[in-house]
Image (spheres, rainbow, N blue to C red):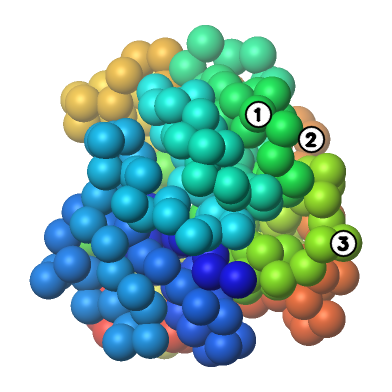
């Protein structure tokens, strides 16, 4: 049983490759640049991309299951080619934003991917993680300057470690017990933006101030960085929603993996040098 990992050098896909290799599963990794990928020697590397469907037939040959990175633009063509190749199982990375109805939501692309996979008749499983702990890597310069400035400091979410998403994906790919399931994934704790800064301060052992921005200030900053206005409004609306209605951990990671999920403090501790 060979499993194809698409987006094999992406933030989650690369970790899925490692998880499957560690489990002794035959893995084929789809990547645009094998020389840069530094994939494990146990993985069969194929040059290609979901963005270029013409590269997929070779990658899909002899594959029984696929870890599918989200790419709405070409997903229906992927599904056609995967069906022709005899693929029966697809585990697709999606997101908890599916169905939130916002014009700028990432959930719109995720929903398109889910619909295509479902319509194609695969034995599917959808993974819907929420906010990533990795998002706070955007704070590196601010942490080094000892002041993090953000709007909605008390907005409380349940950020998840990418490694936990990858571990769940590998577990689900190796089991038939999750066919037709949509798993909403979260980290093990509810923590505010202000709380994340306090954790950074504690773990790194240095004083880091949190400065609250107004919504207008944050909006102007992100638009200035080149983020589309609709996406900025969606992000800010999401923070406002979790300020009024704090998120609660789903417990799904713990249930599926049989171990605690990674806490934000553990995540920071593993990245001390990044924030130093």
User: Which mark identifies residue 35?
Assistant: none
Judge by depth and name the residue closer to the eye, 244 or 98. Answer: 98
Judge by depth and name the residue closer to the eye, 54 or 249. Answer: 54
Residue 72 sits above or below residue 88 on the image: above
Element at label 3: loop
Which numbered disc, 2 or 1, marks the residue closer to the eye?
1
Q: Residue at x 67, y 51 (%)?
A: 89
**Residue for badge 1:** 120
Residue 87 in the image: state x and y as whole percent. 59, 49
Q: Which residue extends farthest left?
A: 35
Element at label 2: loop
Element at label 1: helix
Q: Residue at x 18, y 67 (%)?
A: 34
Which numbered disc, 1 or 3, marks the residue closer to the eye?
1
Q: Residue at x 34, y 44 (%)?
A: 56
Are there few (<14), some (14-19), or many (20+) residues within 10 Å of tag 1?
some
Query: In terms of sequence position, does the residue under pointer 1 or pointer 3 come before the other?
Result: 1
Specify whether residue 38 is in view: yes
Q: Residue at x 75, y 45 (%)?
A: 123
Query: In terms of sequence position, does the residue under pointer 2 or pointer 1 come before the other?
Result: 1
Residue 218 in the image: state x and y as whole percent. 37, 29
Are there few (<14), some (14-19), or many (20+) residues within 10 Å of tag 2?
few
**Residue for badge 3:** 177
**Residue for badge 2:** 245
* Residue 58 horizontal side relative to residue 60, left or right: left
Residue 26 sits above or below residue 50 on the image: below
Q: Write down the quadrant of residue 51 in the picture.
A: top left
């Amino acid at each position: 049983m060979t499993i194809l990992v698409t987006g094999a050098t992406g933030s989650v896909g690369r970790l899925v490759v490692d998880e499957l290799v560690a489990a002794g599963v035959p893995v084929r990794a789809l990547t645009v640049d094998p020389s840069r990928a530094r994939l494990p020697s146990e993985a069969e590397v194929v040059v290609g991309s979901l963005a270029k469907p013409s590269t997929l037939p070779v990658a899909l040959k002899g594959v029984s299951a696929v870890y599918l990175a989200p790419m709405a633009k070409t997903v229906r063509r992927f599904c056609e080619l995967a069906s022709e190749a005899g693929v029966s199982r697809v585990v697709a990375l999606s997101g908890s934003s599916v169905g939130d109805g916002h014009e700028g939501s990432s959930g719109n692309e995720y929903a398109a991917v889910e619909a295509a996979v479902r319509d194609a008749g695969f034995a599917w499983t959808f993974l819907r993680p929420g906010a990533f702990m990795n998002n706070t890597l955007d704070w590196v310069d601010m942490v080094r300057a000892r002041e993090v400035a953000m709007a909605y400091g008390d907005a409380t979410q349940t950020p998840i470690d990418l490694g936990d998403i990858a571990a769940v994906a590998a577990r689900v790919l190796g089991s038939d017990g999750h066919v037709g399931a949509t798993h909403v994934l979260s980290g093990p704790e509810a923590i505010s933006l202000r709380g994340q800064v306090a954790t950074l301060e504690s773990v790194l052992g240095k004083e880091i101030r949190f400065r609250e921005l107004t919504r207008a200030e944050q909006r102007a900053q992100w638009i200035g960085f080149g983020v589309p206005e609709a996406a900025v409004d969606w992000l800010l609306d999401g923070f406002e929603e979790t300020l009024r209605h704090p998120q609660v951990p789903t417990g799904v990671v713990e249930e599926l993996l049989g171990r605690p999920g990674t806490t934000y403090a553990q995540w920071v501790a593993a990245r001390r040098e990044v924030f130093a």
